Image (tube, coloured by chain):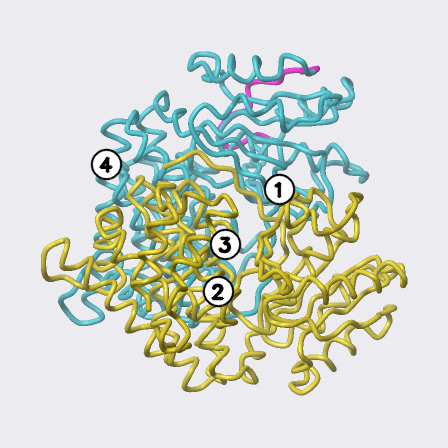
Chain colours: A yellow, B cyan
Amino acid sequence: MNNFEFKNPTKIIFGKDTIQKLKEEIPANAKVLLLYGGGSIKKNGIYEQVKSALSDVDVVEFGGIPANPEYAKLLEALKVIKQEEITYLLAVGGGSVIDGTKFLSAAAVYKGETPWDILANNIRTETGMPFGTVLTLPATGSEMNSGAVITRDEIKEKLAMGGPGLFPQFSILDPQVIVSIPKRQLANGIADAFTHVLEQYMTYPIGAMLQDRFAESILQTLIKVAPKVLKDPTNYKAASNFMWSCTMALNGLIQKGVPTDWAIHAMGHELTALFGIDHARTLAIITPSHYKYNFDAKKQKLAQYAERVWKIKKGSKNDKAFDAIEKTEKFFQELGIDTKLSDYTDDYEGTAEKIAKRFTDRGWVALGEHKDLSPDKVEKIVKMAY
Amino acid sequence: MNNFEFKNPTKIIFGKDTIQKLKEEIPANAKVLLLYGGGSIKKNGIYEQVKSALSDVDVVEFGGIPANPEYAKLLEALKVIKQEEITYLLAVGGGSVIDGTKFLSAAAVYKGETPWDILANNIRTETGMPFGTVLTLPATGSEMNSGAVITRDEIKEKLAMGGPGLFPQFSILDPQVIVSIPKRQLANGIADAFTHVLEQYMTYPIGAMLQDRFAESILQTLIKVAPKVLKDPTNYKAASNFMWSCTMALNGLIQKGVPTDWAIHAMGHELTALFGIDHARTLAIITPSHYKYNFDAKKQKLAQYAERVWKIKKGSKNDKAFDAIEKTEKFFQELGIDTKLSDYTDDYEGTAEKIAKRFTDRGWVALGEHKDLSPDKVEKIVKMAY
């Protein structure tokens, strides 16, 4: 097991009818900017619950934060924060709204020339403007971690940021929100959380027995609840386990003391930037070819995953490892998610070369747990995913 | 799954040679009271590592905190805190030293008449004197939770306390400390952590699939590493997984959203108070008879535990559940821990009645996840453990 440090101060408030607890978490004298996305919260009743809980608090609203939160749009919100002298941010939404709020938390207190620095130079935020979240879409885990990914459309960039000052002060997770989420987004959430776990698990054995078992626990739970969540989102047992699994998948716990990969995300982000494909779907496109290309490096863990998660008992280690990749691809497909780039666009020729070049230009020459995936290898992996 | 709230702000610093990181965690202008136990840290090199890391800090020392930290002794330390105008506490030890430090953290800021109130009335501490820990004995999980158990010998009482202000600010976990721990204490640590998990898991199904799997993960890991830790404490893979399992067993995570039992601890505490038997050993004495007595209420989870943790595949649900109890008792015995009260004392007659009376006198009339274990049932369970 590698040495590690772990601290996660976010307060989780989990369960039925918990949105009303908002009023106990936000300081009474705060001036709150309520941030949300495309407005679905106004249709599903969440907006009313939030407003009712905040009836005694001074609240300004800012809606319209898009999926893959866009830098230009966030600058508009930043203007509101300054003009209205906002002191507290409240994200009501999924990972995109929460990630956007983290950028604003950092940008609101940033003293440098332009907030773009925070992304371009990956400046860590030690203390941001305080914020909380009401999660409306389980998927990214952003509700209990300190990282964010922000998109800047005009230059087709998608960049990460973070820092210990960017943990939400609290996050309210009411699994009942799942009822009003479109099936496509539920499937995306499951695939996203599943891949988050894989990125922190599918590397090489390092003797972190407990972390391995925790990762496998999340994978097993997601596999079990996925068909139930898609079939009947009012199934509270399935919904609550799905929601808690998504949070635990990326709150830092399972990555402590182990090598991590994240090459799937790095490649997937490019597909979103180039084609606008849903984040989770880009992961499903890249995962199988990434594991096949890096089969030798990952086969110990692939075989363990096969045995413990998919209960594959027969065959050689290689057979089990290969079967596990197939099982994973089939799992994505059973969620209704296509796993080839050509399923999403006819214009895929040249994509691999383009992505390899973008990595080279950006100076990212080495991805993966061994930092050995150079752009030429990335090119091969993406090509395998056509 | 039940509704829950979860917040654990303790910073964990885990791994080889991490004690030196102390200097980054304690404010430079702090006046520190360094608390420890019987003095083993002066023999195993930990004391030197701590002192060297704190060479630039003003440190006062207080040693001699006994196992089952004793109220009278802690009052002496409290005097030192006041006289020396201490601002920061540092526990270097196992659960007893850390629990004692939590009491002092609370007592140092308590405004009431006598600090005994904190225990007698279970007064929750919202903000205590800040403290950190260097863990020298994996077992209780006290290094990452906000609870403590304090003994008052003169009245043979052992009482619990806690509150959100009593999380350590940081805890340093270097698995190499295990090398110098006597086998008896290593075995106790394993049994203690194992039973902590059981108390939060062995109740009835509530649909908390992920929490169940996390609990099973810790149990499986402890079962796997236990013989290795006992055979060769220099085995770092075993030591590090043992240490992290003990912390995760009682840092609040696996108890969220599920019913918990804790009757084994309630009964076990009495055996320590009456006979001075090691805490962990009292748990091993009570566990088998508790599960046999409450077989019907617990058999769903006992059978799940049998299948997933002990890989018992054959037999009826009842058979599996019963076999799992036997396996658990055998696990304790293989650690070198006797599982009958009569193995520890010849003077056991009348103990069950005495404990039942103490519960009645104290007004504790209902233990367990169903709050249905009245003193007459406690009497039967303890008698079965003779």
Residue A53, image quadrant: bottom right
B64 horizontally vs A193: left or right = right
A273 horizontally vs A44: left or right = left
Sequence order check: which comes first, mark 4 or mark 3? 4
- Which chain is mark 3 on? B
Q: Which residue is denoted by mark 4 in the rendering?
A: B227
- Which chain is mark 4 on? B
Q: Amino acid at mark 2?
A: Cys
Q: What span is in magenta?
A: B58-70
Q: Secondary structure at mark 3?
A: helix
Q: Nearer the viewer, residue A202 or B185?
A: A202
Q: Which residue is denoted by mark 3 in the rendering?
A: B253
Q: Amino acid at mark 1?
A: Phe
Sequence order check: which comes first, mark 1 or mark 3? 1
Between the C-alphas of marks 1 and 2, the distance is: 26 Å
- Up/down of B248 relative to A148, above or below: above
Label 2 crowd bin: few (<14), some (14–19), many (20+), radius 10 Å:
many
Label drawn at residue A246: 2
Between the C-alphas of marks 2 and 3, the distance is: 15 Å
Q: Nearer the viewer, residue A196 or B101?
A: A196
- Up/down of A303 relative to A371, above or below: below
Give yes or no for residue A296 being in the magenta stretch.
Answer: no
Spot occupied by residue B148 in the image (x, y as percentages of width and height):
57, 41
Label 4 crowd bin: few (<14), some (14–19), many (20+), radius 10 Å:
some
